[in-house]
Amino acid sequence: MTNNTETRNARPLMQSTSGRVIVFYDGSCPLCQKEIHHYIRRDHAGQLVWDDISKGTGLLDEFGITLNEAMRRFHVIDRSGSVTRGAEAFLTLWHALPVYRHLAKTVEYLHLTSLLDWAYEHFARVRYRRACQRGFGNTCSIDTKGR
């Protein structure tokens, strides 16, 4: 597992994360924290970079992702440095973890990515509202009563 302190040094970090999958997550969200720790335990080779966005945005800034965007949707950087979001981000993460690689291939083979994205988007709206209600900074710009 990569030490999160590594994720705070902007310029050296880009070099140390080059070619690695980077996973952004909200460490202040109990549900997100539980899910990410499940994945971290499966990263036996320590090949992924796990960046808790609740502790700082240095790495988000490097990839041009705002904190608000990262709070609204799951973001993962693939090995080539491309930003993936939502269901595509999950597929990127799953491909990087040997134990989940078959799941990612199955979702793709059965053309379930759009269904997964639809389900994730509904979940993400609720999760974001809850983050706003927890008072996560001043990042919330949506009406948390509606939707």
Image: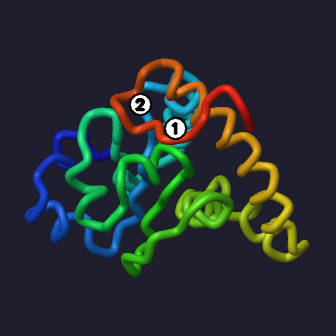
The residue lying at 54 percent from left, 47 percent from top is 72
Q: In the picture shown, does residue 102 fall above or below 49?
A: below
What secondary structure is marked by label 2?
Answer: loop
Q: Residue at the location (86% across, 67% down)?
A: 112
User: Could you tell whether 68 is left or right of 55 in the image?
Assistant: right
Left or right, residue 129 beside residue 9: right
Whether residue 44 is visible:
no
Percent position of residue 60, x then y = 30, 56
Residue at 23% across / 65% down in the picture?
62
Secondary structure at badge 1 equals helix
Residues at marks 2 and 1 touching, judged by CB atoms closer than 8 Å: yes
Give the residue at mark 1. Answer: 36
Q: Is residue 52 above or below residue 101?
A: above
> In screen coordinates, is 44 left or right of 49?
right
Q: Which residue is mark 2?
A: 27
Calculate the distance from the C-alpha at mark 2 to the C-alpha at mark 1: 9 Å
Residue 15 percent coordinates (x, y): 16, 70
Q: Nearer the viewer, residue 55 or 50?
A: 55
Whether residue 96 can be seen here: yes
